[in-house]
Image (cartoon, rainbow, N blue to C red):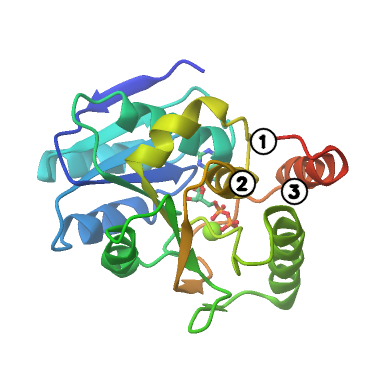
Amino acid sequence: MSYQLTGSLGNAEVGVILPTYREAENIAKLIDEIKNLPLDTSILVIDDSSPDATSENVRNMQKKYGNILLCIRPRKGGLGTAITDGFKIFLSLKNPPKHVIAMDADYSHNPQAIPQLLSEARGGCGIVIGSRYCRGGGTSGWPFTRKIISRVANLVAKSIVGFKTHDCTSGFRCYSTEFLKVTVGGLHSQTYEIQIETVRQALSRGFSVKETPILFSNRKRGKSKLSLTEVWSYVSYTLKTLLHGSGM
Ligand SMILES: Nc1nc2c(ncn2[C@@H]2O[C@H](COP(=O)(O)OP(=O)(O)O)[C@@H](O)[C@H]2O)c(=O)[nH]1
Ligand SMILES: [Mg+2]
């Protein structure tokens, strides 16, 4: 997919990927909070031509802070490809960050937990998962049906990657650049199945996967983009993988 880039990324220790589709109400506040953490961060927003003010709000934040790159893709292309494009952009830098955080841009993932993910990551591992389902983790504000969908999706994911990981579908992650370098060429996920594909890749290549508890809160502003097409993409990936052991 071709894309348009505005702004730049410097030599920060930590890169943050924020995939956005219609996040005008959340993105500026989120960037503010990340930039005010006691960390050296560069932020990459991957926006799929949102028909609201998302990109305009990011451009305004670029006037306030350095090290923010806005990548605009021509159409909604799915969370999986957005995150993978984000990995590729960070890896293409002359000095890529040592750690790359991926998180939702709707405040379900609290930016204040980024230092906690990083301190786990600094011990050395491929992926640190901000985990809702390990001891100390949790979710708040989700309706009953959404809780069930998440639990079932996670159970299916665990049956693919192994039952050692409590939360295989959380999108709040810290990836090591070493892991991304060897993996990025093999990622094919379109949507939410990216979370399983990356854990499978890590385990099969001998990278450790750690978890640290987080509290996931349902978005307060804007709507979920989880559509039937995306649920189907996830289900077909898991079925294909369970039946044929492929899809990695
Ligand atoms: N660039 C891009 N971002 C997406 C796409 N789908 C979802 N997102 C973003 O991915 C994050 C998670 O999506 P969300 O709608 O909150 O999903 P939910 O939390 O599972 O209901 C949010 O920051 C969305 O804006 C997409 O197709 N492209
Ligand atoms: Mg969400």
Q: Residue furthest front?
A: 206
Nearest-to-viewer mark from 3 and 2: 2
Quadrant of picture, ligand 2: bottom right
63 or 114, which is in the foreground? 114
Mark 2 or mark 3, which is nearer the start of the sequence? 2
Q: Amino acid at mark 2?
A: Arg
Residue at the image position 71 percent from the left and 69 percent from the top: 151
Give the numbered dot on residue 200. 2
* Quarter of the image where the C terminus is located: top right
Residue at the image position 25 percent from the left and 43 percent from the top: 98
Q: Residue furthest right?
A: 243
**Crowd band around label 2 with a 10 angstrom C-alpha radius: few (<14), some (14–19), many (20+):** many
Secondary-structure class at tag 3? helix
Q: Position of residue 143 (x, y in %)?
A: 68, 75
Q: Which residue is mark 1?
A: 248
Q: Position of residue 157 (x, y in %)?
A: 71, 56
Secondary-structure class at tag 1? loop
Labelled pair 1, 2 in contact (Cβ < 8 Å): yes
Residue at the image position 49 percent from the left and 42 percent from the top: 21
27 or 101, which is in the foreground? 101
Nearest-to-viewer mark from 3 and 1: 1
Mark 1 or mark 3, which is nearer the start of the sequence? 3
Q: Amino acid at mark 1?
A: Met
**Crowd band around label 3 with a 10 angstrom C-alpha radius: few (<14), some (14–19), many (20+):** some
Q: Is 98 above or below relative to 73?
A: below
Q: Which residue is mark 3?
A: 231
Report whether the residue tagged 1 is closer than 8 Å to ligand 1: no
- Regarding residue 98, the answer to whether it shows in the image is yes
**Structural distance between the alpha carbons of marks 1 and 2:** 7 Å
Secondary-structure class at tag 2? helix
In the rendered image, which quarter is residue 124 located in? Answer: bottom left
